Image (spheres, rainbow, N blue to C red):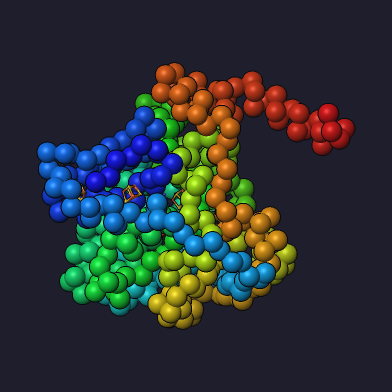
Amino acid sequence: MIRIEDKSRCCGCTACHAVCPHDAIVMKEDSLGFRYPETDMTRCTECGLCEKVCDFIVEKPAEEHDEALVVRAVRHKDSESLSKSQSGGAFTALSDVVLKNGGVIYGAAFNTDFTVSHARACTPEERNAFRGSKYVQSDMGDVFRNVRKDLKAGLQVLFTGTPCQCAGLKSYIPDSLQNGLVLMDFVCHGVPSPAVWSDYIEYVAKGRKMTVADFRDKSVNGWKVHKESFVFEGGKKECRETYKVLFYKNIMLRPSCASCPYDIYHRESDVTVADFWGIGERIPEWDTDEGTSMLLCNSSKGKSIWTAAMDDVHSRPVLLTKEFMATKNPNMLHPARLYHESGDFAKAYEERGFGYVARRWGDMGWRYKAWQLKVFLRKIFGKI
Ligand SMILES: Cc1cc2nc3c(=O)[nH]c(=O)nc-3n(C[C@H](O)[C@H](O)[C@H](O)COP(=O)(O)OP(=O)(O)OC[C@H]3O[C@@H](n4cnc5c(N)ncnc54)[C@H](O)[C@@H]3O)c2cc1C
Ligand code: SF4
Ligand code: SF4
Ligand code: SF4
């Protein structure tokens, strides 16, 4: 039976919750809003299925890196799809293939209160809600069981999510149903705290009705500049950076992200997508603010869905060296390192709330302004 004693050993994928034949496992939130399995011993028969399905703790063989890797630079031909997607719209092209096959798509969407959950889509309109990166851990609910029902009914399913969600689902789905399942993950920096995100939404709204939230709004300063934006009833739009500052500090990530076994070179999902950082060094004429996806086909299933999607996109093969990956997109090779004050952050958040941590570690207090001044002076006078 599952018992979480070390939070860094559980990514919250929900495979154990889904597999339990007695519904003995519920996913319970901690103070940062991350969900962990909790077992009801009055229901548990100690059958061991939950431990068997957990892929996160399985020791993975040591990796051998090749010196270079061929990937695809991808950009959707339809300008509307490109502008609404986080990078180059690879997800839209791949998911259109599955929808045309009569299949279904699972992905992360906003709820009405701007929390983020995984949901199911059968049409392009429903699928469009999954576009855009939501930099927070999504609530999986009972999605794993629903995917299994769809596969059992003979539908093709494209599941999109973090590498750990994909690995958890792959481990949960029986071999007899794997054929219909296509997994698309992304190069993953880690997932931030759902509780901090919800508090931030409340702080930003200040009682106003929010109609749109965007974690990284391309329409503000283009693909390369990360700005979050919010629209309120009446149409007023505000852009901010507080959440971004906390995200990139690696101070509010799920503890498991620092020991992630999936931020590696050889990936288990059928397709992997990413922002193609550094594209200008490989294809200079693609170095624009519209956005470019990087796409990796990791299996024959991945290759066949990509082949069917190719007509909808501009694409070019690109050779990446290990050094290029390490500098431009390090999570292709290894997990993020948690900020050394992550523990202090979690404690302070629990005891003193969002306002305090945003001032102490975000961009709202004097420390951030002092740091900005130091960076500015360093640019002018060199090391100070
Ligand atoms: C938490 C997070 C961390 C990331 N870290 C990196 C990184 O370090 N380097 C990098 O190159 N790219 C990273 N990405 C991926 C990148 O931001 C783009 O999502 C990717 O390039 C796909 O672009 P697109 O235009 O094809 O997708 P879009 O059309 O924008 O579609 C977004 C896809 O991401 C899925 N998704 C969005 N939010 C979540 C979520 N919270 N949980 C699970 N699935 C989600 C959706 O279901 C959809 O399939 C990250 C994404 C997320 C959500
Ligand atoms: S990693 Fe997934 S399967 Fe393993 S304990 Fe956590 S939620 Fe359960
Ligand atoms: S041991 Fe079996 S019954 Fe108990 S929680 Fe795990 S899957 Fe459920
Ligand atoms: S970094 Fe790893 S553990 Fe964290 S969300 Fe991404 S895939 Fe999951």
Give residue 363's position: percent from left, percent from top.
59, 29
Give residue 121's position: percent from left, percent from top.
29, 61
Tell me if 228 is positioned left or right of 318 in this view: left
Q: Is residue 88 visible?
A: no
Q: Is residue 319 above or below residue 383?
A: below
What is the quadrant of residue 155 in the picture? Answer: bottom left
Give residue 34's position: percent from left, percent from top.
37, 38
The residue most toward the right is 381
The residue most toward the top is 352
Q: Is residue 182 above or below residue 141?
A: below
Relative to the observer, which residue lies in front, 7 or 313?
Answer: 7
What is the quadrant of residue 244 in the picture? Answer: top right
Tell me if 161 is positioned left or right of 316 in this view: left
Relative to the observer, which residue lies in front, 106 or 144?
Answer: 144
Q: Is residue 9 visible?
A: yes
Identify which residue is drawn at 19% across, 70% down.
152
